[in-house]
Amino acid sequence: MHVVPTVPSVLLASASPRRSELLRQIGVAHEVRPVHVDESPLPGEAPAAYVLRLAERKAAALRRGLGSADPRPVLAADTTVALDGRIFGKPGGAPELHEMLGALSGRTHQVHTAVAVLHAGGASARVSTSDVSLRPLTRDEIDWYWSTGEPADKAGGYAVQGRAAVFIRHISGSYSGVMGLPLYETWELLAPVLGPTAGSGAP
C-alpha cells in the first residue's frame, strides 16, 4: 500500500482562521500557535516596512517562546491596508468603519502582506502588495456591513472573501495575499525548508 508522506509540521504564529485555511489549501500541515506583539506603527513607517517588521517580530516571539526543544519551522504573517501611504488598522466601531471605508470608497488602495519563516537554517521573508479598487459606497451600505459583524477584526475594515466581495471592483495582485497569506510567496519560503514532501501532507 502506498503511503503519502506527511509534511513536517509548521508552527503558525497566528490565530487567523483564514491563514490556517490557506495553508491547508496547499497541503501544509501546521499547528496554530498565536503570539501577541505591539502592532503600533513607528513614526513615518511605510506600510510595507510595517507589515514586514510585524511578521518578523511575531515569528521571533514564537521562536523565543519555544526555545531549542522544538525545532519545527515557524511561519508568521501580517497584513495592512494602505491608502496614500496611510496605514489602516482594524475598526473599533461603526464610526471608525465609516471613516475607513469612506476613504477607500471609489478609490484604489494597497494591501500589503508580509510572510516570515524562521527555521534551523536561518530566516527569510517576503512582502506581497496588491491593488484593490472599491466601487463607491453609500452610508447605508457601510451601516449594513458593520451590522454583519464581519469587519470588526479586519485590517482596513473589510474581508475580501466575505460579504465585502460585492464592494470590490478590481484586484491586481494576489487574492490570497489580500486574504492574509500570499500563497506564492509562502510556498517560496516553505518549499526549501520542508523538502521534497512539501505540499503532500494532510493538515
Image (cartoon, helix red, strand yellow):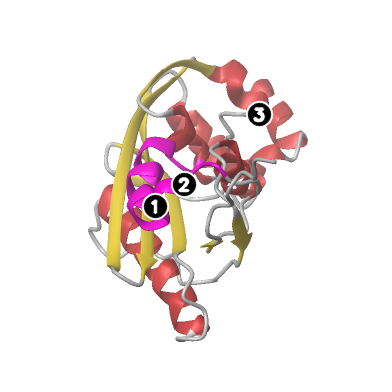
- The residue segment tinted magenta is 180-200
**Where does label 3 land, which residue?**
162
Residue drawn at 37 percent across, 68 percent down: 119
Question: Badge 1: few (under 14), some or many (20 or more) residues near its Cα, within 10 Å?
Answer: few
| Three-letter residue code for mark 3 | Gly
Q: Distance between the residues labelled 2 and 3?
A: 29 Å
Instruction: Judge whether 63 appears above or below 23 on screen.
Output: below
The location of residue 89, given as percent across then percent down, is 48, 50
**Where does label 2 land, which residue?**
198
Residue drawn at 55 percent across, 48 percent down: 28
Q: Give left or right: position of 188 versus 149.
A: left
Which of 95 and 55 lies nearest the eye of the viewer?
55
Residue 195, labelled with which disc? 1
| Three-letter residue code for mark 2 | Ala
| Three-letter residue code for mark 1 | Gly
Instruction: Tell me the element at label 3.
Output: loop
Q: Give left or right: position of 13 versus 53.
A: right
The location of residue 167, given as percent across then percent down, is 56, 19
Instruction: Tell me the element at label 2.
Output: loop
In magenta segment, residue 15: no
